[in-house]
Structure formats: C-alpha cells, structure tokens
Amino acid sequence: MEIITKDLLINFLFILLPLLLLQMFYLLKFVYRIEKMKENLFTVLSLFSIFLCMLFPFPVGDGLIWDLRRIPFVIGVLYGGPKNGFLLLIFVIVTRYFMLGVNDGFYITIITFTLLAVTVSFVSRYYLKMTLEQKVLTSSSLVLLSTIITFIVVSLFFNVIVSVNMWLQFFFITFLGTVIVTLLIEVIRINSDLLEKLMKAEKLEVVSHLAASISHEVRNPLTTCKGFLQLSYDEERSPEIKQYLGTALQELDRASDIINDYLTFAKPVPDKVEKVFVNEAVQNVLNILTPLANMQDVQIFYHPDQSGHANISGDRKKLEQSLINIVKNGIESMQKGGKLEIYTVAEYPKVRIAISDEGKGMTQQQINRLGEPYFTMKDNGTGLGMMVSFSLIKGMGGEIHVESELGNFTIFTIEFPMVT
C-alpha cells in the first residue's frame, strides 16, 4: 500500500515540474518583453510530463503498469484542443509500444486512451469558457471516468487481478492530483493575463503622457497654418496651386484629427456624466456611417432593445465616438460588401452592445493586440481610433469582448452597467 502511494506521488511531482517551467517561461516573457511565445509550448510540456510518468510507472502484473499519465493527457487536450489530443494519443501509444511491447496493457492503453481522446476533444471546445469551478469539476470527472473505464476493461477482458485497496489509492491520488493541477494552471493563466495587462498599461501610460504634453503645443501652430492656408486657398486663382492648397488643408485636417485622438486618449474620463440612452446613441452613429456603408455595399441591420432599460451612465458624445470607430472598422473590413448587424440588449445589471461583421476577421494574436498604440490592420491606418475607443469605453466603466474567426467574422461585445 505504501509502495504504490510513493510511486504515484513521484509521478505527481513529474506533472508539477512542467508547470513550474511554464510559469518560468511566462515570467521570462514579461521580464524580457518577449512578444511571442511558441504556441506549441504547452504541447511540449504535456508530452514531457507524460513521458516522465510513463518512464517511472508502478507495475501491477501481466504487462499492466500504472502511472498518472492521464492527468497531463486530459489537461493537455482540454487546454490544447483536438489537434493536441491527436498528437498526445499517438505519443502515448507509440511510447507504450516501445517500452513494453504488445501485451494486455498495450491493448488497454489503445482502448481507454482512444475513448478518452475523443471525449476530451469534444469537451475542449467549451472548456476554456467555463468558470473555475466548472473547469475543476470537468477535468477531474474526465480523469476519473477514464480510470473507471480502465477498471471495467481490466476486470472484464483481461486476466489481471487488482486489489480494491490499490484501486482506491489510485482513484484518490488521481482525483486530488487533477484538482491541484487544474487550479495551478488557472493561477498561471491568471498571472499571465495580469502581466499582459501590465505590459499594455505601461505602453498606454507612455502614450498618454506624451499626448498630454505635446498635443496642445502642436495644435496651436497647426491651427495658425490652417488659417493662412485657407485664406490663400480662397484668394488663389490658379487651379493647379489651388489643388495643392486643398491637399495641404486635407492633410492638416487629418493631423488635427490624430491630435484630437491623442487628447481624447489622454483624458478618457467623461467630461460630463449623464444618463445615456444607448438606442439613440447607436442610431446617431448609424446616421453618420450609413453613407459610408452604402459606398462599401454593406447592409446594416439594427436590432434595438425593446425593454426601454438600455440606459447607461457616461458621456454620450464619447460613447458615439467609440462606436463610430468600431462600426467604421467593421464596414471597411468588408471590401466586397456584406452584412453588419448591431444589437442592443438590456439584461440587468448590464447593457450590451453587440456589433458583428462579415469581414476578414482576426487571429487570436491580433485580437490580443487590439487597443494597443499604433496597432492597426489597415494599410493607411494609425491604430489610434481603436486605442481611443478602448480607452473611452473603459473610462466609462465598460468592458469589451472580441470574438473573431479569420476570413469569416468579427463580433465586438461591449458591456456597461445599467442605470435606471
């Protein structure tokens, strides 16, 4: 009884080791400002953990060995997805074959881990959207289910006798180990998200200070230049020179708009807080952008909330400015036309604005960079519009969630606290 517990606890340490390495990699990413971490890092660590568990198993008899490889296998598929599940399944079967050859245990491995891979791959589609409690319950249930299936297969089809005490030890350590590993991974993910937000906050703080200190100084000479150019444009008779002056005025207007974005970003807190009727604000935005949508052959469908409770507290003009930037980006992303839909929904205690388009979409990496200074997907864009939108919405106590699929769609969901 003591021997199996000792061997399984050693296996559990082999599972914890890759988690420590994962935490170390995330810290290095933050300290040294590494923008990209290899997407297959989690897969490699899962393979490493499974290999160590299989390298030091507890032999039961007749080619049957016990270890805790199910824990990193299930966790690896839940967080890595179906592709990761297929890779881990092949790795487990091949490693088992080269370690002990073909015997009863080898067939048990094929049966149980194939069923486990299919089941966990299906669950992985919904896993990352679950709450912490649901994740712990799901991961531990899947591992225990796999253990029970193994118990049934061994009892019914193979001539291997395992005592009840050994099964109970195995169940207990497997369950407890899965719970601990799931909690540790969630803690690592939370810490990583906090570090990412801190890195973004540092960048935004620098831009904010520069905006506040420079924008006013630049705006005054620009206004003077624009005034004299406008006078020259009005009095100029030569069509060629007048065209040049017109181009210069347009570029000055563009520079002025960029400076206004900087000033707005530097002061995202609403100038005046009032009760904002979201349906009316969205309608004002559509009145402004409908001509642009018609030029792009984009159809806009607006589905306003009918409850009469879609009201928030904030600055109406800044809300409209934020929505204009987001809706305009959605329209411009559909270069060959398409459909853009806007929903407003009041569900206490939140008011939700959903904006979906059929544009070119984004990768997860691009989604993560939305709102950063100078990040844009346009050839001639500055990235300031989306940066300002994120800043203004957060300044009014709102949250932004983005869901996108490359080449298919993008959905912006904006949530504000409801006011009555």
Image: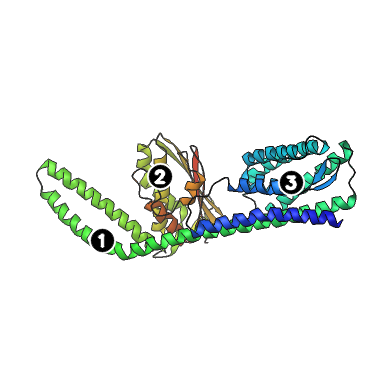
Q: Which mark is residue 54?
A: 3
Q: Which residue is at the front of the view, 186 or 49?
A: 49
The residue pinned by badge 2 equals 377
Q: Residue at x 38, y 57 (%)?
A: 317
The residue pinned by badge 1 equals 218
Q: Residue at x 88, y 53 (%)?
A: 165
Q: Do we see residue 194 in this rendering?
A: yes
Q: 10 Å neighbourhood of mark 2: few (<14), some, or many (≥20)?
A: some
The secondary element bearing badge 2 is classed as loop
Q: CA distance from mark 3 to mark 2?
A: 46 Å
- The percent position of residue 213, horizontal first and vertical second, equals 32, 66
Q: Which residue is at the front of the view, 284 or 119?
A: 119
Q: Are marks 1 and 3 in contact (CB under 8 Å)?
A: no
The secondary element bearing badge 3 is classed as helix
- The percent position of residue 18, horizontal first and vertical second, equals 64, 53
Query: What's under tag 1, amino acid-wise?
Result: Val
Query: What's under tag 3, amino acid-wise?
Result: Met
Q: Are marks 3 and 2 in contact (CB under 8 Å)?
A: no
Classify residue 46 as left or right of residue 317.
Answer: right
Q: Which residue is at the front of the view, 27 or 286?
A: 27
Q: 10 Å neighbourhood of mark 3: few (<14), some, or many (≥20)?
A: some
Query: N-terminal of the two: label 3 or label 2?
Result: 3
Query: N-terminal of the two: label 1 or label 2?
Result: 1
Q: 10 Å neighbourhood of mark 1: few (<14), some, or many (≥20)?
A: few
Quadrant containing the N terminus in the rendered view: bottom right
- The percent position of residue 349, horizontal first and vertical second, equals 57, 59
Classify residue 168 as left or right of residue 128.
Answer: right
